[in-house]
Image: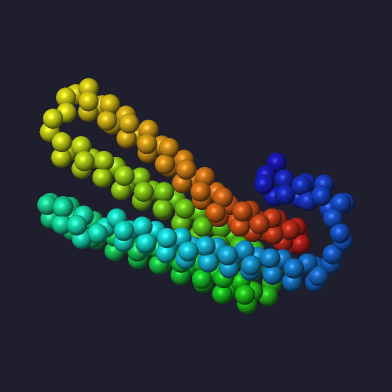
Amino acid sequence: MDELDLIKKDWQKRNEDLPKYTQDELMPMLHKKSSSSVKWIFIVSILEFAFWLGIDVLVSSEEYMDSIENQSFLWFLKILTVLNYLVLFGFIYLFCKNYLRIQVTDSVRKLMKQIINTRKSVKYYVRYNIGLFIIMFLIGGARAIMMQTTFNTLEFWIICGIMVFILLIVVGLLILFYRVLYGILTRRLYKNYKILNQMEL
């Protein structure tokens, strides 16, 4: 049984308990709910960007930058920071674009397409943020270890183990954070998508 059959079966089970609406009545309701969810995804992404920007400003002070003696590593951090902001701006632009498009969508199929595009954008956005954190954590950890020359083999592996443990804990918290932050909104969109899909059958 494929996903489409499962959706149809699930809808048939629920259909008996739901109020009866015509397609013309359902479409404006689903459009409004979907538009609201996409709008909140856009707003939350801006607030999150502002939060992390504030953290970055506090952490990346002039004193910290001056403490980095390796100029190659310093330039690497600066370039990575610029690229990261460009990517984040790109995602915010996508969320804004999805919201504006869904505002003028006037058909079931187009609304379904916008819902799919929005959910994909959110999924890539979350994966990017978590992936970037892992990369930066590993780079920072490796640099901290390389700056210490007094480790013996046992101490080295103990520190590596502690770092991996911390990384797993923080990544788990990030995944939980994003599930709560964006999961509620994307689940609402998926619920709307299933209803729209049934209307197209």
Taking 99 as reference, is 184 above or below it?
Answer: above
- Residue 157 at least partly seen: yes
Where is residue 63 drawn, in percent x and y? 19, 57
Judging depth in this view, the residue of 28 and 176 nearest the camera is 176
Q: Residue furthest top?
A: 154
Q: Picture coordinates of residue 33 (x, y %)?
A: 68, 65
Give the image location of residue 121, x and y in percent. 50, 60
Of residues 31 and 46, the one drawn nearer to the viewer in this rendering:
46
- Relative placement, left or right, of 156 versus 32 is left
Q: Is residue 181 left or right of residue 163?
A: right
- What residue appears at the point 34 percent right and 34 percent down from the top-left corner? 164
- Quadrant showing the N terminus: top right
- Colouring chosen for the image of the structure: rainbow
Residue situated in front as seen by the camera: 105 or 191? 191
Name the residue: 59% across, 60% down.
116
**Residue 200 located left or right of residue 122:** right
Q: How many marks?
A: 0
In which quadrant of the rendered image does the C terminus lie? bottom right
Viewer-proximal residue among 191 and 107: 191
Residue at left offset 72%, top offset 66%: 30
Query: Residue visible at 29% across and 60% down?
Result: 81
Residue 109 visible in the shown view: no
Give how far across and how far down residue 122 sits, in percent: 51, 57
Q: Quadrant of residue 77?
A: bottom left
